[in-house]
Image: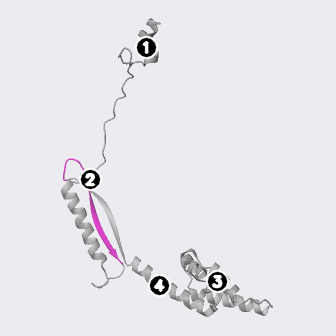
Protein backbone atom coordinates (compact mmCIF):
# COMPACT_ATOMS: atom_id res chain seq x y z
CA UNK A 1 0.00 0.00 0.00
CA UNK A 2 1.27 3.46 -0.84
CA UNK A 3 1.16 6.38 1.62
CA UNK A 4 -1.42 8.36 -0.36
CA UNK A 5 -3.57 5.34 -1.23
CA UNK A 6 -6.87 4.73 0.55
CA UNK A 7 -7.95 1.44 2.10
CA UNK A 8 -10.72 1.04 -0.48
CA UNK A 9 -8.36 1.25 -3.48
CA UNK A 10 -5.81 -1.01 -1.79
CA UNK A 11 -8.50 -3.58 -1.04
CA UNK A 12 -9.71 -3.40 -4.65
CA UNK A 13 -6.20 -4.17 -5.91
CA UNK A 14 -5.88 -6.96 -3.34
CA UNK A 15 -9.18 -8.55 -4.41
CA UNK A 16 -8.09 -8.43 -8.06
CA UNK A 17 -4.87 -10.27 -7.22
CA UNK A 18 -6.71 -12.86 -5.10
CA UNK A 19 -9.25 -13.48 -7.88
CA UNK A 20 -6.52 -13.94 -10.47
CA UNK A 21 -4.72 -16.38 -8.17
CA UNK A 22 -7.92 -18.37 -7.66
CA UNK A 23 -8.32 -18.64 -11.46
CA UNK A 24 -4.81 -20.06 -11.57
CA UNK A 25 -5.73 -22.66 -8.96
CA UNK A 26 -4.10 -21.07 -5.89
CA UNK A 27 -6.39 -20.68 -2.91
CA UNK A 28 -5.58 -19.21 0.48
CA UNK A 29 -7.58 -19.21 3.67
CA UNK A 30 -8.99 -16.12 5.38
CA UNK A 31 -6.14 -15.84 7.91
CA UNK A 32 -3.54 -15.69 5.11
CA UNK A 33 -5.47 -12.87 3.41
CA UNK A 34 -5.66 -10.90 6.66
CA UNK A 35 -1.98 -11.50 7.37
CA UNK A 36 -0.96 -10.26 3.90
CA UNK A 37 -3.16 -7.15 4.24
CA UNK A 38 -1.73 -6.23 7.62
CA UNK A 39 1.86 -6.68 6.44
CA UNK A 40 1.40 -4.34 3.47
CA UNK A 41 0.12 -1.40 5.53
CA UNK A 42 2.48 1.61 5.85
CA UNK A 43 4.32 2.70 8.99
CA UNK A 44 1.64 5.11 10.24
CA UNK A 45 -0.70 2.12 10.57
CA UNK A 46 1.73 0.22 12.83
CA UNK A 47 -0.16 0.91 16.11
CA UNK A 48 -3.43 -0.37 14.63
CA UNK A 49 -1.73 -3.50 13.26
CA UNK A 50 -0.08 -4.15 16.63
CA UNK A 51 -3.42 -3.81 18.38
CA UNK A 52 -5.13 -6.23 15.99
CA UNK A 53 -2.38 -8.82 16.36
CA UNK A 54 -2.23 -8.48 20.16
CA UNK A 55 -6.00 -8.68 20.62
CA UNK A 56 -6.05 -12.16 19.02
CA UNK A 57 -9.32 -11.51 17.21
CA UNK A 58 -7.77 -12.12 13.79
CA UNK A 59 -8.79 -15.80 13.79
CA UNK A 60 -12.46 -14.86 14.31
CA UNK A 61 -12.40 -11.79 12.05
CA UNK A 62 -13.59 -11.95 8.46
CA UNK A 63 -11.87 -10.02 5.68
CA UNK A 64 -14.81 -7.63 5.32
CA UNK A 65 -14.83 -6.87 9.05
CA UNK A 66 -11.09 -6.13 8.92
CA UNK A 67 -11.59 -3.75 6.01
CA UNK A 68 -14.37 -2.02 7.99
CA UNK A 69 -12.05 -1.56 10.97
CA UNK A 70 -9.28 -0.23 8.74
CA UNK A 71 -11.66 2.21 7.01
CA UNK A 72 -12.82 3.53 10.38
CA UNK A 73 -9.21 4.01 11.46
CA UNK A 74 -8.44 5.72 8.14
CA UNK A 75 -11.24 8.22 8.77
CA UNK A 76 -9.82 8.97 12.22
CA UNK A 77 -6.36 9.54 10.73
CA UNK A 78 -7.78 11.89 8.10
CA UNK A 79 -9.70 13.79 10.77
CA UNK A 80 -6.54 14.17 12.88
CA UNK A 81 -4.49 15.35 9.89
CA UNK A 82 -7.16 17.89 8.93
CA UNK A 83 -7.07 19.31 12.46
CA UNK A 84 -3.28 19.63 12.39
CA UNK A 85 -3.12 21.32 9.00
CA UNK A 86 -5.83 23.79 9.94
CA UNK A 87 -3.61 26.25 11.75
CA UNK A 88 0.10 26.81 12.08
CA UNK A 89 2.19 29.30 14.01
CA UNK A 90 5.51 30.75 12.89
CA UNK A 91 7.85 32.80 15.01
CA UNK A 92 10.07 35.19 13.07
CA UNK A 93 13.08 37.01 14.47
CA UNK A 94 13.30 40.73 13.71
CA UNK A 95 16.21 43.02 14.42
CA UNK A 96 15.20 46.37 15.82
CA UNK A 97 17.46 49.41 16.11
CA UNK A 98 15.68 51.20 18.95
CA UNK A 99 18.61 50.80 21.36
CA UNK A 100 22.36 51.21 20.80
CA UNK A 101 22.78 47.44 20.99
CA UNK A 102 20.64 45.58 18.55
CA UNK A 103 18.07 43.42 20.27
CA UNK A 104 15.85 40.80 18.75
CA UNK A 105 12.09 40.76 18.93
CA UNK A 106 9.84 37.87 18.08
CA UNK A 107 6.76 38.44 16.01
CA UNK A 108 4.01 35.83 15.89
CA UNK A 109 2.38 35.23 12.54
CA UNK A 110 -0.72 33.13 12.14
CA UNK A 111 -1.61 31.25 9.02
CA UNK A 112 -4.78 29.27 8.67
CA UNK A 113 -6.09 27.22 5.81
CA UNK A 114 -9.70 27.25 7.03
CA UNK A 115 -11.48 29.67 9.27
CA UNK A 116 -12.79 28.06 12.41
CA UNK A 117 -15.75 28.87 14.57
CA UNK A 118 -15.38 30.18 18.11
CA UNK A 119 -16.32 26.91 19.78
CA UNK A 120 -13.90 24.67 17.90
CA UNK A 121 -10.66 26.64 18.09
CA UNK A 122 -8.98 26.86 21.46
CA UNK A 123 -5.70 27.47 19.69
CA UNK A 124 -6.54 31.18 19.35
CA UNK A 125 -6.38 31.50 23.13
CA UNK A 126 -3.05 29.70 23.21
CA UNK A 127 -1.63 31.96 20.50
CA UNK A 128 -2.70 35.12 22.28
CA UNK A 129 -1.33 33.81 25.59
CA UNK A 130 1.99 32.94 23.96
CA UNK A 131 2.32 36.31 22.27
CA UNK A 132 1.47 38.16 25.51
CA UNK A 133 4.07 36.17 27.44
CA UNK A 134 6.78 36.82 24.85
CA UNK A 135 5.89 40.50 24.71
CA UNK A 136 6.01 40.86 28.51
CA UNK A 137 9.35 39.04 28.70
CA UNK A 138 10.80 41.33 26.07
CA UNK A 139 9.55 44.44 27.91
CA UNK A 140 10.74 43.19 31.29
CA UNK A 141 14.24 42.16 30.25
CA UNK A 142 14.77 44.61 27.43
CA UNK A 143 15.55 41.76 25.05
CA UNK A 144 18.58 40.64 27.05
CA UNK A 145 17.20 37.20 27.69
CA UNK A 146 18.09 35.99 24.22
CA UNK A 147 21.37 37.87 23.88
CA UNK A 148 24.48 35.73 23.79
CA UNK A 149 26.54 35.74 26.94
CA UNK A 150 30.21 36.34 26.36
CA UNK A 151 32.79 35.86 29.08
CA UNK A 152 36.26 37.37 28.88
CA UNK A 153 38.85 34.64 28.47
CA UNK A 154 40.77 33.89 31.66
CA UNK A 155 44.52 33.86 31.72
CA UNK A 156 46.09 30.61 32.76
CA UNK A 157 47.84 30.79 36.08
CA UNK A 158 51.46 29.81 36.16
CA UNK A 159 52.39 26.75 38.20
CA UNK A 160 53.35 27.47 41.80
CA UNK A 161 56.04 25.62 43.72
CA UNK A 162 54.93 24.45 47.17
CA UNK A 163 58.49 24.37 48.47
CA UNK A 164 59.86 27.82 47.64
CA UNK A 165 56.48 29.45 46.84
CA UNK A 166 57.78 30.92 43.57
CA UNK A 167 55.83 30.75 40.30
CA UNK A 168 57.03 29.09 37.13
CA UNK A 169 57.85 25.56 38.30
CA UNK A 170 56.61 22.67 40.42
CA UNK A 171 58.09 21.17 43.57
CA UNK A 172 59.58 18.31 41.59
CA UNK A 173 61.71 20.72 39.56
CA UNK A 174 62.46 23.16 42.37
CA UNK A 175 66.05 24.50 42.31
CA UNK A 176 66.22 24.91 46.09
CA UNK A 177 65.47 21.20 46.61
CA UNK A 178 68.18 20.29 44.12
CA UNK A 179 70.65 22.56 45.94
CA UNK A 180 69.89 20.84 49.26
CA UNK A 181 70.60 17.41 47.79
Q: For the residues marked 1 and 2, what is the alpha-carbon distance in whole angstroms?
A: 50 Å
Sequence-first disc among 3 and 1: 3
- Asked if residue 180 is positioned above or below residue 82 in the image, the reply reads above
Q: For the residues marked 3 and 1, what is the alpha-carbon distance in whole angstroms?
A: 82 Å
Q: For the residues marked 3 and 4, what is the alpha-carbon distance in whole angstroms?
A: 19 Å
Image location (x, y in percent) of residue 162: 38, 19
Sequence-first disc among 2 and 4: 4
Determine the residue positioned at 70% across, 85% down.
Answer: 32
Residue at mark 2: 145
Image location (x, y in percent) of residue 38: 62, 81
Q: 153 or 108, which is in the foreground? A: 153
**Overall secondary structure of the magenta stretch?**
strand
Q: 126 or 173, which is in the foreground? A: 173
Q: How many marks?
A: 4
Residue at mark 1: 174
- Taking the magenta stretch, the answer to whether it contains residue 103 is yes
Residue at mark 4: 76
Determine the residue positioned at 34% across, 70% down.
Answer: 89
Part of the protein shown in magenta: 98-112
Give the quadrant of residue 39: bottom right
Front of the two marks 3 and 1: 1
Q: Residues within 10 Å of mark 3 (few under 14, many from 20)?
A: some
Q: Identify the secondary structure beneath mark 2.
A: helix
Furthest toward the right, the residue is: 25
Q: For the residues marked 2 and 4, what is the alpha-carbon distance in whole angstroms?
A: 42 Å
Front of the two marks 1 and 2: 1
Q: For the residues marked 4 and 1, what is the alpha-carbon distance in whole angstroms?
A: 80 Å
Sequence-first disc among 3 and 4: 3
Amino acid sequence: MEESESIQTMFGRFQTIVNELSFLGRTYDNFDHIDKLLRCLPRKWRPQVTFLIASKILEKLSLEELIGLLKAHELELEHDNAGRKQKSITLNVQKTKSTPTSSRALRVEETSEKSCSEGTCDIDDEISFLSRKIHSMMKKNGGTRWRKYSRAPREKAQPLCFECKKPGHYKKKCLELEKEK
